[in-house]
Amino acid sequence: MHFTSEQRLDDDVLEREFTLGEIPGILWTPASASAPVPLILLGHPPLGLRKMYPRLVGRAQHSAAEGFATATIELPGSGDRPRWAAVEQARADLRQAMEAGEPVSDEIVDALILPLVEKAVPEWQAALDALLALPEIGGPVGYSGGVISIGIRLAVVEPRIAAAGLFAGSFVPRAMFEEARQVTIPLHVLLQWDDEGNDRQAALDLFDAFGSKEKSLHANMGGHTGVPQFAGDAAAQFFTRHLK
């Protein structure tokens, strides 16, 4: 891990950009922390860190105020990373189906999501190795956000993740439902009831499939980007319970 820039944000948060091999990322830490702090990995859709930055930094600042460090990495094929032809084609097929008002087939969803999960999860694990080696990061670790299938896989294969807050706003391959049954960590699942790009029933079925003894579903009215502020407050309380 090599830090490439550093700045202090207005609310006493230290923001550092880094690279991990070819993977760009950002780490936010409470600048005034006097001891190692827990870490939350910030998941996001594959739109690129530059585009997602305003939303990510808002989540990071909120988490820092609660005493958490947060970090994120650029997903494969996104942002400044090399283009990924197979996923680009799957995205084009998805746009074509949605613009035509046609159902999105299982084949499109599998081609869009499964390769991303297979490649992104080991990268998240490598980033976690590097982050936990820093003296200011002490764990435990949480995962917050989407792509929800990445969060599912991480919850299954990564024992250092103690709790997860998942955003039910992305397509989920049928194969991931079986993996969801293997998830046992505490879950806080956020669902926008009128999400224009999400199959509500599939999101409810996925929640039902999770094997966790402690899981809660928080559904709010509104579209994909209409998440209310109090939903963020509830997620913060969830991580405070499980990471502190």
Image: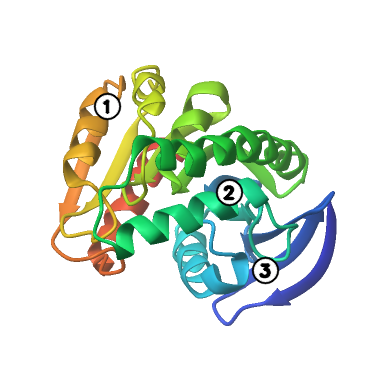
Decide which of 240, 182 is in the foreground and name it.
182
Q: Which residue in the structure is indicated by mark 2?
A: 87
> Helix or strand or loop: what does disc 2 sit on?
helix
Between disc 3 and disc 1, whose residue precedes? 3
| Res 242 → quadrant | top left
| Residue under the image location 73 percent in, 37 percent down | 126
Residue 166, image x, y percentages: 37, 44
Between disc 2 and disc 3, whose residue precedes? 3
> Helix or strand or loop: what does disc 3 sit on?
strand
Decide which of 231, 198 is in the foreground and name it.
198
Q: Which residue in the structure is indicated by mark 3?
A: 15
- Relative height, residue 184 to residue 141 (above, below): above
In the displayed orientation, state which residue is furthest to the bottom: 10
| Residue under the image location 16 percent in, 40 percent down | 201
Q: Residues within 10 Å of mark 2 (few under 14, many from 20)?
A: some
The amino acid type found where label 2 is placed reads Val
- Relative height, residue 96 to residue 165 (above, below): below
The amino acid type found where label 3 is placed reads Glu
Q: Disc 1 to disc 2, how far (Cα)?
A: 34 Å
